[in-house]
Amino acid sequence: MDHQGYFTGWNADFEKVVVRGKDREEFLSRVREQFWQRFFFTPEERQMRLSLNAHQQESILQNADQILRHEIALFTETPVALGARIPWHTDYLSGYTWDSKVPFYRCLPAPYPGGYDIKVPWELSRFQFGVWLGMAYAFSGQEQYALEWVRLIEDWIACNPTGMGVNWACTMDVAIRVVNWLWAYAFLADSPLLSPSFHFSFIRSLWEHGRFIERHLENTMRVPSNHYLANLVGLGYLGTLMPLFPEALRWREWSWGEFQREFLRQVYEDGVSFEASTSYHRLVMEMALSLTALMKHNRVPAQHAFLQRLEKMLEALMYLCQPNGTFPLIGDHDNGRLHRLKMYNPPEKEWSDGRHLLAVGAVLFQRSDFAGAAGREWEDALWMLGNDAVSFMRTALQEGDFLNGVRVFPKGGWWVSHHPKGVLTIEWGDVGHAGRGAHAHNDSLSFTFSSSGVNWIVDGGTLSYTGDYHSYHLSRSTAMHNLARVVGAEQNCHDERIPFRIIQSGRITDFSWREEGDLFEAQGYFLHWDQVHALERRWLFDGQSGILLIADHVYPSSKPGELFLHLNWGVNEVTEAQGIFLCQSGEHRLMIQPLSAHSSWWVEMGKMAIGYRIIRPSRIIRALFNNGWVVYAIGEAQQEQDWRARLQSTLYRGRNIWERILLDTGCLS
């Protein structure tokens, strides 16, 4: 089949099927009129929302100026100069280029062992940076930003005929591009530089995007994922905002109903995404909130069960967020966003901060606790919800007043304890994705710990996907998480040559927790199905002292065990003195003290990803132990004397619960 000829034929169809003999000026006038009737804001309302987000103007203009120079930061900490003409088909980090003249289905990720990353051109062609050009134009009125957006759109359309090349190979990215083109258009539509001929080409391409999405939905695999939800969001946006398309009503009604049905399948009853990843949890929620807000604005009703589940999803995110607004990077993490409506400072915080979604959820569900947890991250809510967000933001609770105690998400496998002296998060779920483990890691019974706004013990993030198979394999391994194990053992099988697949080889056979006053205990048991190894782990947090005790027991006890504790990259110094590891981050200090006998401890350098492929050096505290057990204490303290006094208090208070463990491991005499 001549695929290029097939898709090119859609150009003639557009004139016949969509324009239907109308004068072009009349057609475009109606398109603009109906767009403004249905988008989140009108041109007049846009001015008010610009004033509400005026604090973002300087950073938006700085980033837009970088885009004018074709300097873009994707999967890098600093912008990369892409040259006079953007290489849409190239992984500019490796130099590899896909053939733009072949059908989309022949454009494939790198085979094992990698070497180039298909996500780079995909991410670039999502056009999320185009929204910043639009905002810069709206803030400043300077036509250079509109001119650049027009040039980029025209160049992209010319270089990416429908269905040809790498940027049509993933329907999810086609759909996300649609959403960002429409958001940018809302800021730029009034520019005189958007000529009738450009408008016509732009609207035609949007229609071709919609037809492509409908014909290539990512629902053919056994278990659809967030990709399919993104497809539906793209059709929902097009069907709502482009009602002159003959398919528009069908796209809107079918995609909205199907999105809600699929969302209920992909999100557990406790509100946790089935993909075993906090970052994909946030992405799915961002797509759901954006589409829900658009439908609500257009008075399209939502199902009660869907809204209940979405509210639960927001609750899960609220409890996951640390006091500093970040959430642990459990599972895969690839910087996935639907749209990026604000600039973050520091930039890397964007990849682990979900508070902007809590602000949108606060308004949609009238939840003051969501508003309090959102802190000052209201930009998305202000752009989408306007005055409703303003009035609600002013009555919000103070940050963090509502979070205290334990929250358990049994289907998703998250356990979170918020206490003024520390936040402990435990992952105890399965591999997710209906057993396929597409975005899960070998992290059952792993944990993260923060105190005083500092994330101390963290997940290592995701180093790469198919750009480097070995790094991706390492990211998912037991050793990259805060776990104990029989030396060299893996929790679940995963083949380095097969990405996005973990074969569940064991499971949590028991997880329980209890409170006794301000003592919180949790315990879990992971058993490998062939019973060659297992991990029993217990946590005891003392709310009085702020000290966390952990006891790990690996089976069989006859084999040596090893422990990994991954410190955040911001922990810039670790020293050992009199059997205590002193971890320094700014003015704060964390103590980690081995308590059990028959173990040796040391510090080694490692690495972690603060965003997809954004890697920083970090420190790992390691231990080797015999007789099956290793026990240790973690907590913040400035002085060693104070630490030892509080630790003795915790051991004394905890002996009613842990007496047998503490005696057997030599922690108590």
Image: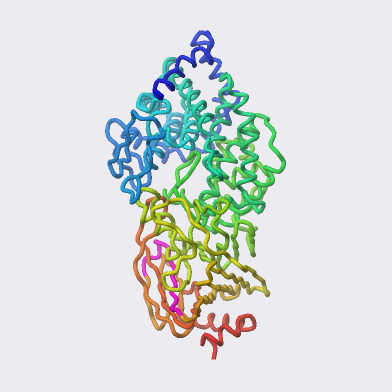
What is the number of callouts on the image? 0
Locate residue 391, reporting x and y percent. Answer: 64, 40
Q: Residue at x 32, y 40 (%)?
A: 91
Q: Residue at x 52, y 8 (%)?
A: 21
Locate residue 193, reporting x and y percent. Answer: 40, 20
Q: Quadrant of the N terminus?
A: top left
Locate residue 409, reporting x and y percent. Answer: 63, 58
Q: Quadrant of the C terminus?
A: bottom right
Q: Which residues are magenta?
A: 559-573
Residue 563 lies within the magenta run? yes
Q: Residue at x 48, y 21 (%)?
A: 203
Residue 450 in sight in this render: no
Is 240 in front, or is 449?
Answer: 240
Position of residue 384 relative to residue 200, above or below, is below
Residue 619 in which image quadrant: bottom left
Is 131 in front, or is 9?
Answer: 9
Locate residue 622, reporting x and y percent. Answer: 40, 73
Residue at the farthest bottom position: 669
Residue 79 lies within the magenta run? no
Position of residue 12 relative to residue 462, above or below, is above
